[in-house]
């Protein structure tokens, strides 16, 4: 396990990082401490133990769940496509914790809803936008797109135009979906930079 810290770290944080690395020697890949923020790169199978520990331990108490978001790393990482980043806050110690977990598009990741109720909608959004499945989620369904939507819009391989077009039909007095077709003239792009001419 690698540890990277900056010069602003105090002795209590150094002790806590050493304590974490001694308790979870095989569950943590990398730990960084930069400008008061602790970031832990954890293994996917055991990251829930690490979150549970940091929530309930007397020296950490990261009891406030702030956010979870995903990043598509299709161009940069061939082994794992997505990086999921969990953000926590300890009000008592006035510090932040980021836990990063890598996963691919075919395997599921464990849900955090039983530890933090606020994770429900964030995980539903990640499922809807990226297609990352969360095991043991109480209500995993689409939250931002329609139920018949095809694909996951925030993946980097999703086309910018989408697959379907939504328009209002005056004869039917309803919204209808149609297959999106683009003329060939709109598919050619001029890649010359106009600012360098």
Image: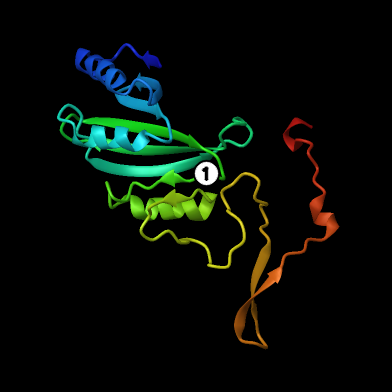
Judge left or right: residue 12 versus residue 133: left
Q: Which residue is mark 1?
A: 107
Question: Which of the pair 133/62 is nearer the observer?
Answer: 133
Element assignment for label 1: loop
Q: Residue at x 64, y 74 (%)?
A: 167
Where residue 75 sits, quadrant-wise, is top right
Q: Position of residue 197 (x, y in %)?
A: 79, 32
Where residue 100 sits in the image (x, y, percent)? Answer: 42, 33
Vertical placement of 189 versus 45: above or below? below
Picture coordinates of residue 67 (x, y %)? 35, 44
Q: Is 37 situated above or below 47?
A: above
Looking at the image, which residue sits at the far bottom? 171
Residue toward you, 127 or 173 = 127
Q: Identify whether 29 is placed above or below 128.
A: above
Location of the N terminus by quadrant is: top left
Classify residue 25 as left or right of residue 147.
Answer: left
């Amino acid at each position: 396990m690698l540890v990277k810290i900056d010069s602003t770290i105090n002795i209590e944080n150094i002790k806590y990082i050493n304590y974490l690395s001694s308790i979870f020697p095989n569950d943590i890949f990398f730990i960084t401490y930069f400008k008061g923020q602790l970031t832990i790169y954890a293994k996917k199978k055991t990251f829930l133990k690490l979150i549970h520990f940091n929530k309930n331990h007397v020296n950490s108490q990261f009891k406030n769940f702030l956010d979870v978001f995903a990043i598509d790393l299709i161009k940069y990482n061939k082994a794992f496509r997505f990086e999921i980043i969990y953000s926590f806050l300890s009000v008592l110690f006035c510090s932040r914790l980021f836990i990063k977990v890598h996963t691919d598009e075919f395997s599921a990741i464990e849900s955090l809803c039983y530890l933090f109720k606020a994770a429900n909608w964030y995980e539903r959004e990640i499922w809807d936008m990226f297609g990352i499945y969360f095991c043991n989620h109480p209500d995993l369904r689409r939250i931002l797109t329609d139920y018949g939507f095809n694909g996951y819009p925030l993946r980097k391989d999703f086309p910018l135009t989408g697959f379907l077009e939504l328009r209002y039909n005056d004869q039917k007095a309803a919204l209808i979906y149609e297959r999106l077709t683009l003329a060939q003239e709109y598919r050619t792009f001029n890649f010359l930079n106009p600012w360098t001419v």
